[in-house]
Amino acid sequence: MSFTARGADARKTRRSDGGPVIDAHAHWYPEEWLKAAEAAGPSSGLKVTRAAGVWSLTGEWTGVPAVTPDYIDLDLRLKKMDRQGVDIHALSLTTPMTHWASPDLGLKLSRMFNDAASQAHSAHPNRFVVMATLPMQAPQLALAELQRAAKLPGVRGIYLPTTVKGKELDDASFSPIYAECERLGFPVFLHPVETIGKDRTGEFYLRNLLGNPYDTGVAAAHLIFGGVLDRFPSLEILLPHAGGTLPGIVGRLDHGVVVRPELKHMKRPASAYLRRFTYDTITHNDALLMNLIGLVGADRVVLGSDYPFDMGYERPVEVVERLKDLSAKDKDQILGKTAARLLRIQA
């Protein structure tokens, strides 16, 4: 994919080097996916209802009470992207993904999202790329869908939950998927769905406020301590919400490697793996974002908005632009250059 700011999609990029501004954390529900989930009925594990153009998703682990047109309508999305100064969205299916369903239904819904997102790319090749969804509850089906989806126009990576029905991401059954992603050069974008501490985070929206970053940290620790990053040295992992708890507690993890017998297999400290991950910008705190950039480097940070959730950024580009102590080169890196490398987008 080559970016161009000419013709029908002409815009003035916000990057000083002229490259595209890329939002790597942007969610989308195809309407046909919602209709198929609705038709499957509550017995499938997800209750889908709609009224006055607004959908509602309710399941055992997760729910989205108001899937408004912003989540679905691509024309609305493009207008919003233009207002934000964003050139490209990497489209990903958000909660509940597809691993809540039976293997057959999960495969059907994964294919439906991947095909629809690829069609969105084909209709707007300078505006959308695709993070494919896989039925991770059935790893063999997930591998087959990964191989199929990899051939679709616009597919540039995959989107996985931070845990799959109680299975952690270092489970051996997922190794063939990681191996294939490494072979394809596909980054793996993680996102919490079944968050940790469910029994204690029911109030005050803590399931999201705390659960999402905590769960991301747990998943990253499993990838480090479970040896996934060692077995697949070229595998790229993208962490949402600025890496969750991982960057802030990495010193504690390092100390654990030194003193705990459970970690005696570790040959390097946890901090040695920090740059094996890429992190989005969603901190909601400029000082924390600058700390992250200082810790891992601008070449390991990508723009993210969590579009269109209220816990994301309404003006994601301005979050980077207002960092006065950041050089123009580093701002360009975060606004699009890092993501362009991961997603194979040529400026």
Image (cartoon, rainbow, N blue to C red):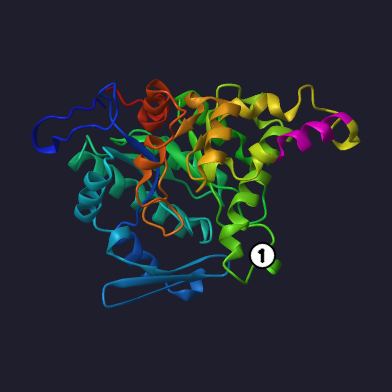
Say left or right for 309 vs 163: left
The residue at the point 59 percent across, 26 percent down is 275
**Percent x, y for residue 3?**
23, 27
Residue 109 visible in image: yes
Q: Residue furthest bottom?
A: 51
Q: Is residue 154 magenta?
A: no
Q: Depth check: 243 or 16 in front? A: 16
Residue at (24%, 25%) from the top-left corner? 2
In reply to whether residue 252 is colored magenta, the answer given is yes
Three-letter amino acid code at disc 1? Lys
For the stretch drawn in magenta, the main secondary structure is: helix
Please name whichever residue, 70 or 122, is drawn nearer the observer in this view of the structure. 70
Q: Which residues are magenta?
A: 249-258
Give x and y (percent) for residue 314: 36, 52
**Residue that badge 1 annotates:** 198
Judged from the image, the secondary structure of the residue bearing numbered disc 1 is helix
Question: Does residue 62 lie above or below 330 as drawn?
Answer: below
Q: Is residue 276 visible?
A: no
Which quarter of the figure is the N terminus placed in? top left
